[in-house]
Amino acid sequence: MVSLPTPEDIKKLRKKVGLTQTELAKLAGVSQSLIARIEKGTVDPRLSTLRRIIEAIKLVEMRAKKAKSAKDVMYSPVITIKSGEKVKKAIELMEKYAISQLPVVNDNGVPVGSITESTVLKKLLSGEPEKILKLKVEEIMEESFPTITPSTNIKDIQQLILKKYPAVLVMEKGKIVGIITKIDLITKAVVK
């Protein structure tokens, strides 16, 4: 007799491959709330639903093993913003390119900070939006994303992104050649 995974097994497997409930739900074609209820053990899913969830996890695991280094998953070219630009321009770039963070660079293209949707939203909600939009990016930017080389191991990248950073920059010969975010890890290392 085949034993089916328990709710705890599903949660452990999901976390092992670095997926959120929302990401797993999307890959398996179910709702995030269903994943949450399955993991809590408050719902008994259909076998077909359970199969889709397990297959999605296995697919993520398999694809992650194929992707070996940063060059396999990085996105290029990188959209950046100069530190002297206005916050309004940063928002426009994020909207135009459907991204949630931007590396901030100096006039030579060297990373000096970062700006994220969360940072901008917090500032807009805590002050006068019209004034904040006119501020320079350098006035509200946060620390720069960590930098890695194109040959950095995928496991090391996963650790950086899962632990603290929303993105990492791939640098070669002093130039930004790529960026890796959570979605890049999912779509390029997982759902190719």
Image (spheres, grey):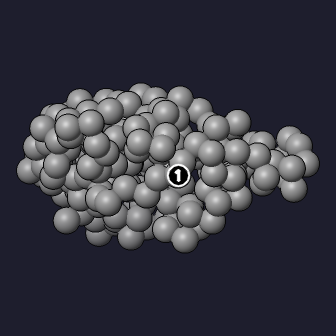
Residue at the (41%, 64%) spot, across then down? 26
| Residue under the image location 34 percent in, 41 percent down | 169
Estimate the x, y position of residue 37 in percent, counting from the top left: 52, 51
Q: Nearer the viewer, residue 43 or 179?
A: 179
Q: Secondary structure at mark 1?
A: strand
Give the x, y percent position of residue 124. Answer: 80, 49
Q: Is residue 168 at least partly visible in the picture? A: yes
Is residue 61 shown left or right of residue 26?
left
Please tell me which residue lies in front, 107 or 111.
107
In this view, the residue in front, 66 or 106, is 106
Residue 159 point in image, percent of width and height: 31, 30
Going by the picture, which residue comes out furthest to the right?
A: 128
Can you give x and y, in whole percent of width and height, for residue 138 in the image?
Answer: 64, 38
- The total of numbered circles placed on residues is 1
Residue shown at 53%/29% (left/top)? Answer: 143
Q: Quadrant of residue 167?
A: top left
Residue sitting nearer the eye, 149 or 190: 149
Decide: few, some or many residues near mark 1? Use Cα within 10 Å; few <14, some 14-19, many ≥20: many
Q: Is residue 36 visible?
A: no
What amino acid is at disc 1? Ile
Residue tagged by mark 1?
81
| Figure check: 118 above or below 59 | above
Q: Is residue 120 left or right of residue 98?
A: right
Question: Residue, x 33% and y 48% (percent of image)?
Answer: 179
Whether 140 is drawn above or below 45: the answer is above
Q: Quadrant of the C terminus?
A: bottom left
